[in-house]
Image (cartoon, grey):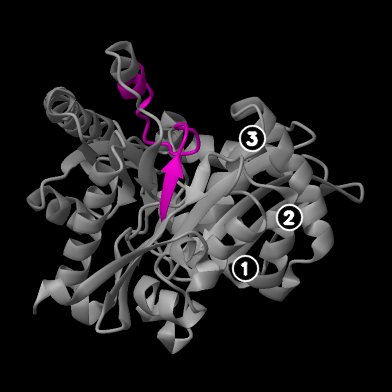
Amino acid sequence: MDQAQIEIHVLNSLAQIAPEDWDACACPEAADGGAPDDPFTTYRFLKALEDSGSVGTGTGWQPHYLAAHLDGELIAVAPMYLKSHSQGEYIFDHNWAHAYERAGGRYYPKLQIAVPFTPATGRRFLVRPEYREVGMSALVQGAVQLADNNEVSSLHVTFCTADEADAGEQMGLMPRSTQQFHWLDQGFGDFDGFLASLSSRKRKNIRKERAQANAFGGTIRTYTGDEIQPEHWDAFWEFYQDTGARKWGSPYLTRRFFTLAQESLRGDIALVLAEREGNYVAGALNFIGRKTLFGRYWGCVEHHPCLHFELCYYRAIDFALENGLPRVEAGAQGEHKLARGYLPCETHSLHWVGNPGFARAIKDYLDAEREAVAEEIEILTEYGPFRKIEVEEQE
């Protein structure tokens, strides 16, 4: 195919693309009416970020969506943003920025192909299946050329798939490996089957934690789709503000985002709420993919023992098992997840740096980091919670 026929456009609003055209690139698998693999790259999710003011002027996430057309047909898109800081990314480059600026450079603005505030793995180069190779190539070349022509310090593609990381490396981008903790269904059947796969000590600890959590004096329920009501978002906004103030200084998402979530995203959501004496006291927000439950936010206005573990980890496993989802991604960081059945998994990003000397230094750093991450994953997996048949103790 003659790649010269492909035209790349940069758009500052999703309103410039028809929803069905974007989703034909982002989630063609959902054309059957099922869930998308990645709910975060759908038109409805990214448009809610934009329309709610969670991204855009004043946020440090200025939309610069890439759109590739072949003979007038949209064949590929990418959620790209001009960044004036490194907040809300979860694959951190703060040290790179400090080093670049100490050397006299200007690190910001930079370009970021990502889903804002969302450390969840998914395709970042969204290409119609029949144009997969040529579409990704066009998007990568277009993004790098845009960065270079505008003397932007760098381009970053975060939480891409392993296949994209491999392809991007072949195209000259620098790959980076990091890690998260994911729960994977190994044919457990139900939660008791999952518990049976654990060592005796870990099994007892989880049972104890679940008992403590459920003795908080109220009820816990998971709401999905039309079960979710506007008043649930009023409560969750309080939880989210509390978490945002403690973790980031201020919440990334605006209150309007949750209003828009009620209107257009509730079919993608599993909202776990704890209620006591007629008041919601804690909650966990999950998004539902075709094969994955993505844990995103947690918060509370009352603190009860183990309630966080119950709402965020154990109820997520319950939901995944009940709905045939083989994976739970519980968000960034947290080695405490290991004891609760979430194993270390490699995550991927790609990077381009315009300054040749700085790029060489970054490449050396990334080479060493990849080795360290691989070693850490191997060690943590060995110390995982699953029983080893030959030494399993008797209960």
Element at label 2: helix
Give the x, y percent position of residue 9: 34, 65
Q: Position of residue 38 (x, y in %)?
A: 42, 64
Quick one: label 2, few (<14), some, or many (20+) residues within 10 Å? some
Name which residue lies at 23% across and 28% down: 376
Query: Which sits earlier in the primary sequence, circle 3 or circle 2?
Result: 2
Which residue is the extreme one toward the top? 102
The answer to whether residue 285 is seen in the rendering is yes
Q: Which residue is mark 1?
A: 265
Residue at 74% in and 61% down? 259
Instruction: Find disc 3 in the rendering and name its residue.
Output: 306
The local crowd at label 1, few if under 14, some if 14 to 19, many if 20 or more residues have their Cα within 10 Å, is some
Which image quadrant: the N terminus? Answer: bottom left
Q: Give, as a three-letter code, the residue at label 3.
A: Cys
Question: Could you tell whether 323 is left or right of 311 in the image?
Answer: left
Residue range in magenta is 79-98
Mark 2 — residue?
A: 256
Seen in the image, is 54 located left or right of residue 168? Answer: right
- Asked where in the image residue 77 lies, by quadrant, the reply is bottom left
Q: Earlier in the sequence, mark 3 or mark 1?
A: 1
Looking at the image, tell me whether mark 2 or mark 1 is earlier in sequence order.
Answer: 2
Q: Are marks 2 and 1 in contact (CB under 8 Å)?
A: no
In this rendering, which labeled residue sits more in front, label 3 or label 1? 1
Quarter of the C terminus within the rendering: top left
From the viewer's perspective, is residue 381 above or below residue 78?
A: above
Give me the C-alpha separation between circle 3 and circle 2. Answer: 30 Å
Q: Amino acid at mark 1?
A: Leu
Q: Secondary structure at mark 1?
A: helix
Along the line of sight, the residue nearer the viewer: 48 or 286: 48
Which mark, residue 328? none
Is 295 located above or below residue 224 in the figure?
A: above
